[in-house]
Amino acid sequence: MKKLSLALVAMLPLAACQTLPPAADGVSPARLTEARALPWPEGRRYVVDPAASELRLVVRADGPMARFGHPHVIGGPAIGGEIALAEPFHESALRLSITVNELRVDDPDWRVAEGFEPDMDEDAIAGTRRNLLSAELLDAESHPEIRIESVAISGPDWQPDIEALVTVAGETRQLTVPVTLTIEAESLTAAGRFVIRQSDFGLKPFAAAGGALRVADEILIRFRIEAETAR
């Protein structure tokens, strides 16, 4: 059984295990759109600090053989960009980017925070990252960045819903991102969590054993963006 488990890990470095709780209710559907980002508004400008910001993507396994997989947490100081706060607030805007090659896999502290065992085999980590950046998934060579641009903002300034255009591996979709926002004179913090489906972006979750062991379509995303006023 141990040999079988190790073999499946080698086949599926991106797989996660079924011990991860099911994806949260309320998947944010990513949909095809003809919307375009609005013109950049006048207003107070904030610049994202990648070193102080955090991004986490939690992937899990699906299928009858999911117990043979392992959970993985992907993230890192990969977010950059800027935010403009306008008057009125609903005319504010953001444009962010995630540098794909700066994404890391399975930092022990991240795994502990998600309730997983901290240690992972180095070969499995390397394989996961290789799959992540491959042409079949994020295609880092041709598309080095994931881009996020706001289309509309609704709700109160402390917890707005942001309609955003998200471009992954050349495919653009529109989705709603709920955000908790803290605004200070010299800084801004935006944080949230939501779930997306890989298939909504035209990505096919990795599978093995005839589909009996596969990466779940849903990915849990957590983020915290720290930004400071532009100098």
Image (cartoon, rainbow, N blue to C red):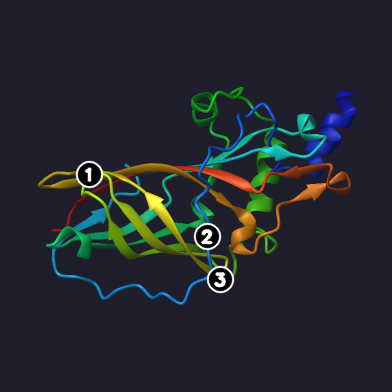
Horizontal side of residue 37 vs 130, given as left or right: left
Which amino acid type is marked by label 2?
A: Ala
Q: Residue 29, image x and y in percent?
A: 53, 56
User: Where residue 170 is drawn, which disc sits there?
Assistant: 3
Picture mark count: 3
Element at label 2:
loop
Residue 163 falls in which quadrant of the image? bottom left
Whole-Å distance between the Cαs marked 3 and 1? 32 Å
Crowding at mark 2 (Cα within 10 Å: few <14, some 14-19, many 20+): many
Residue type highlighted by circle 3: Gly
Mark 3 or mark 2, earlier in chain: 2
Query: Could you tell me which secondary element the residue under label 1 belongs to?
Result: loop
Question: 61 or 138, which is in the foreground?
Answer: 61
Is 226 above or below relative to 115?
below
Q: Which mark is residue 30?
A: 2
Task: Give the mark nearer the N terminus: 1 vs 2.
Answer: 2
Residue located at (66% from left, 29% from top): 120
Q: Secondary structure at mark 3?
A: loop
Is there CB contact under 8 Å for labels 3 and 1? no
